[in-house]
Image (cartoon, helix red, strand yellow):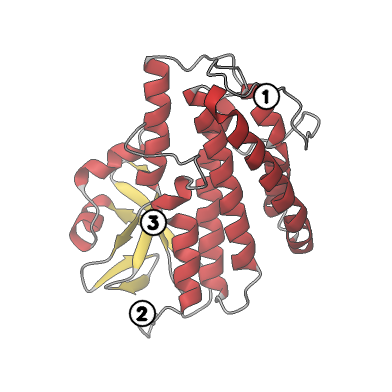
Amino acid sequence: MKKPYLAKFSSLYLFATLLLFSNACIAQTGNYTLNPDDYEVYQPNTPSQTRPEAPVHSGTSVSRDYREQILQLFQFVDEFELSFREMKYLNIVGRLPEAKLKFQQVFNYLQKIKPTMEADQKILASLYIAKFELLEGLTKVMNNLKIDSGFRAALIRSGFYVAAMYNQLIDEFRKPVSFKGADLVKLKSQVNNIARKTQKYEITSKYLKISGNKIPKGEKIMVLEVKGNKALVLYMGPTMNNRQIEGWVSLSSLRKRTFWKKGNRDFYRP
């Protein structure tokens, strides 16, 4: 690339980046916050349920098993996600108002039953809340023509990456597993790891070369995968050729040219 990248981001770029890929994306809605310090795509195949039916006993602290109900209540989020996978823009924009209405109904219901939910059930609800907020943010990105196509593609690519991690954990709840003791500790650690894997790394040297493109100092990247001594890196910014920039970079180069640390490769171990 002959010309350096423009380092000036509009407020929209900043909004899109912070909305989708800050650690807050691990869910900060109402009382269903996943605290990282405390703890491929699902195809829905069960009937959609938009209204909660389980009884709520006010004033009780007795725990109940809401796992299956939570999965059913949030099925509309899984279905909404399929619109993104199919990249049908009109379906995405057209379905958002209904999805937002369902989300608010489900969220209000969860607030009522929260005192009787187990810790793992609260985590499941928080994962779905985070995924819905992610999809809502992606809709705004796709709907704004001021973002160049290269940056938009990178935001969508990283959005799918984050959603896939949510889905992997959500799918664990579809198995006959009881998250108690060590299993609950492991679940919380996996949730914590999402924030670690989605952090962005600023380039500290003159540039970082990705697939023949010299990304200048001050710009940010996301590491999607680590294999051997190399990392698959995605540039999170506008491009000169309006194309997404992604490629493999040596870990030694990452350590020298970004804030990447040697121990960070542990985030990407199976």
Q: Residue at label 3?
A: 222
Position in image of residue 266 (x %, y %): 29, 37
**Residue type of the residue flagged with mark 1:** Val
Secondary structure of residue under mark 1:
loop
Of mark 2 and mark 3, the one earlier in the sequence is 2
Residue lying at 58% horizontally and 22% vertically, measured from the top left: 59
Most extreme residue toward the right, as rendered? 47
Q: Residue at label 1?
A: 56
**Residue type of the residue flagged with mark 2:** Ala
Depicted 261 relative to depicted 44: above or below = below
Position in image of residue 14 (x %, y %): 44, 70
Residue lying at 50% horizontally and 57% vertically, measured from the top left: 20
Badge nearest the viewer, 1 or 3: 1
* Count of numbered circles in the view: 3
Q: Residue at label 2?
A: 7
Q: In the rendered image, which quarter contains the C terminus?
A: top left
Which disc number belongs to residue 129? none
- Residue 265 appears in which quarter of the rendering? top left
Visible in this render: residue 262? Answer: yes
